[in-house]
Amino acid sequence: MTELGDYLRACRARISAQDLGLPTSGRRRVPGLRREELASLAGISVDYIVRLEQGRVKSASPAILSALAQALHLRPDEEEYLLRVAERSSTTPAGSKPATTHAAPRRQQISPAVRVLLDSMVNVPALVLGRRMDIIAWNDLGAALFTDFAKLPPKQRNHIWLTFLHPQVRDMYRDWTRVARECVAYLRMDAARYPDDPELAQLVGELSLKDTDFGTWWSDHRVRAQRQGRKAFHHQVVGDLDLDFQVLEVRGGNDQSLLIYTAGPGTSSAEALAFLTSWASTQARPATTRNVTKDG
């Protein structure tokens, strides 16, 4: 089997015939769309769907992939993932070892301009994320919100690792399950961009071994490049905060993004964040500890 086949089967399982207004008579052995229903919606043959899912199609055309995405009601980020794994499958026959392509560049380091930007953001927590959701830089308030990243081993300075395996960070989230599932879906997008990244494979392996929820959700094949939303925190110093977040692409940053958290004006969360800012100023860290170069 291939990643493309696994993804198509997962997408079929998540969408019901009833949702699409299709007849639902007869007993169904598996949830979701049948192959023949997907084939009819996409305008292709059932045999072609079977061969796609079994990895026996050398290269699916963009038109067919677009038709499948439309039939499965995929979001743009889900369609991007479909295209990437289809490209991967076209160069990797079913049952063979993947060729080493699209490997991630080795070094992750922010530019001086991004460092200046981070240091100027004194009233909002901010992190710079690299590939695999590595945390490669942060400001004082970002460390105050989460943890003192500088004291962590380099491999633990990773957003999803902390979310699943760091007790303090995990307990901060009042809606941990939703946040954790979103992290898994985001990491899957990275896995499609860099399928031969050995550090990403090691990260997935460690999380799968140490947390059964991660393993279950990784197998769901859900993907989501979520760029904004809200997270509910409980901070050990300031209590509850409901913070909006935005993920902004760093231009020329080699897959880097700026993650910032803000609170609505006049809210109790804004008051708590202001108190956290004041507290963080008493816990100031040397600038050299806030800009970390990571290999991989």
Image (tube, rainbow, N blue to C red):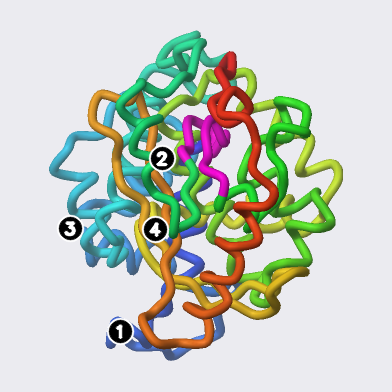
Residue at coordinates 28% horizontally, 67% vertically from top-left?
Answer: 73
Residue to which mark 3 is pinned: 43
Residue at coordinates 44% horizontally, 34% vertically from top-left?
Answer: 192
* Vertical relation: 61 (above or below) 227: above
Of labels 1 and 2, earlier in sequence is 1
Residue to which mark 4 is pinned: 226
| Count of numbered marks | 4
* In the displayed structure image, the side of residue 228 where residue 45 appears, left or right: left
Q: Which residues are magenta?
A: 128-140
Circle 1 packing at 10 Å, graded few (<14), some (14-19), many (20+), is few
Circle 3 packing at 10 Å, graded few (<14), some (14-19), many (20+), is few
Q: Position of residue 121 (x, y in %)?
A: 39, 49
- Look at discs 2 and 3 and give the one toward the viewer: 2
Image quarter where the N terminus lies is: top right
Of labels 4 and 3, earlier in sequence is 3
- Look at discs 4 and 3 and give the one toward the viewer: 4
**What secondary structure is marked by label 4?**
loop
Circle 4 packing at 10 Å, graded few (<14), some (14-19), many (20+), is few
**What secondary structure is marked by label 1?**
loop
**What secondary structure is marked by label 3?**
loop
